[in-house]
Amino acid sequence: MSCEEDSSSAGWTLRRNTSTGTRAKCGAGFGKPAGSSCNISYIDTLDSGVYWCESREGPISNMVNLTVTGGSVILQSPVLPVMEGDDVTLLCKTKTTPSNLPAAFYKDGSLIRKQPTGHMTIQHVSRSDEGLYKCDISGHGESPSSWITVTDKHTTTPPPTSTPPHVSNVLVILPVLIAASVCVLVLLVILVLLMRRLVHRKPEDIDIDAVYSTARTEDIKNKDNKSKIRDTESVAVYSAMRTEGIIHGLKTIRTRRPRC
């Protein structure tokens, strides 16, 4: 088995989880390391399990489930990791006989249950269900162990739905209409307050002195005008009377005759 290196990490090491141990490292219990590869010269049913590559910097590769069969019984289990909350079905069958024979299922070496048809379903799996599973069919033998990985369930956000054009236009215009309505409402409130203030406002005190001064000024003007009119009329009468007297005097003088 080999791990492919890339420019971002180096020193890949092969590790595995089997019935004989977890996170076992190549060269420490199984195989011989050769750079980023691991050579296993003799493989056994105990080598069944999950294998992956791990770097010194921390990144790991995808996990691969490797099953080594030593007999006719096979346990079919999910190869890829299972998400929490999902249902997992395990099938125990033989190569030569029907697959609905009674079977016993084990997890980490402990008996879970016996099923009359060779099927076992684990409902709503959780992280505690992660481990090595195997099955046994009476008279046919035991299957190799298979590792089942359970991962956290990731919530996905549904893609946004497309909005029709007319709905989009309404959404754009709606804030403008709301703002305009608010402005109009504020102006109306201000106008109503101003009208109420004018209606309930007390009349200001009248400046008596100013009125009296204005009236007196008007009266003086009127008296001056009347005086001017009377003076004009008197002058005219006097002038007329004087003229009449002069004319009468002249007539008198003219009518007199000189005495001899």
Image (cartoon, rainbow, N blue to C red):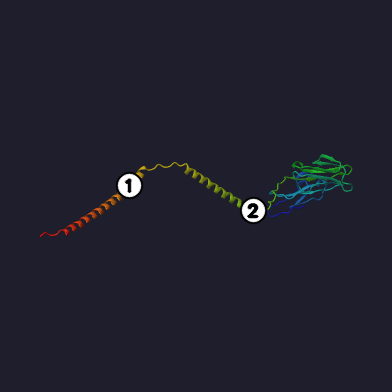
| 205 or 154: nearer the viewer | 205
Residue 93 percent coordinates (x, y): 86, 46
Q: Give the structural element (helix, strand or loop) at label 2.
A: helix
Q: CA distance from mark 2 to mark 1?
A: 78 Å
Q: Which percent across, then down, holds residue 163?
A: 67, 53
At x 24%, y 55%, the residue is 240
Residue at mark 1: 219
Q: Earlier in the sequence, mark 2 or mark 1?
A: 2
Which of the two residues, 68 or 218, is positioned nearer the viewer here? 218
In the rendered structure, the answer to whether residue 9 lies left or right of residue 45 reads left
Q: Amino acid at mark 2?
A: Ser
Is label 2 in contact with label 1 (beta carbons under 8 Å)? no
Judging by the rendered image, the residue that carries numbered circle 2 is 168
Question: Dot 1 surroundings within 10 Å: few (below 14), some, or many (20 or more)?
Answer: few
Three-letter amino acid code at disc 1? Asp
- Near mark 2 (Cα within 10 A), the count class, few <14, some 14-19 or many ≥20, is few
Say which of 92 and 11 sits in front. Answer: 92
- Residue lying furthest left in this view? 260
Left or right placement of residue 89 versus residue 233 in this view? right
Q: How many marks?
A: 2
- Residue 205, image x, y percentages: 40, 41
Residue 110 falls in image quadrant? top right
Quarter of the view holding residue 132: top right
Quadrant location, the C terminus: bottom left
* Mark 1 element type: helix
Residue occupying image coordinates x 55% and y 48%: 184
Q: Is residue 83 left or right of residue 241?
A: right
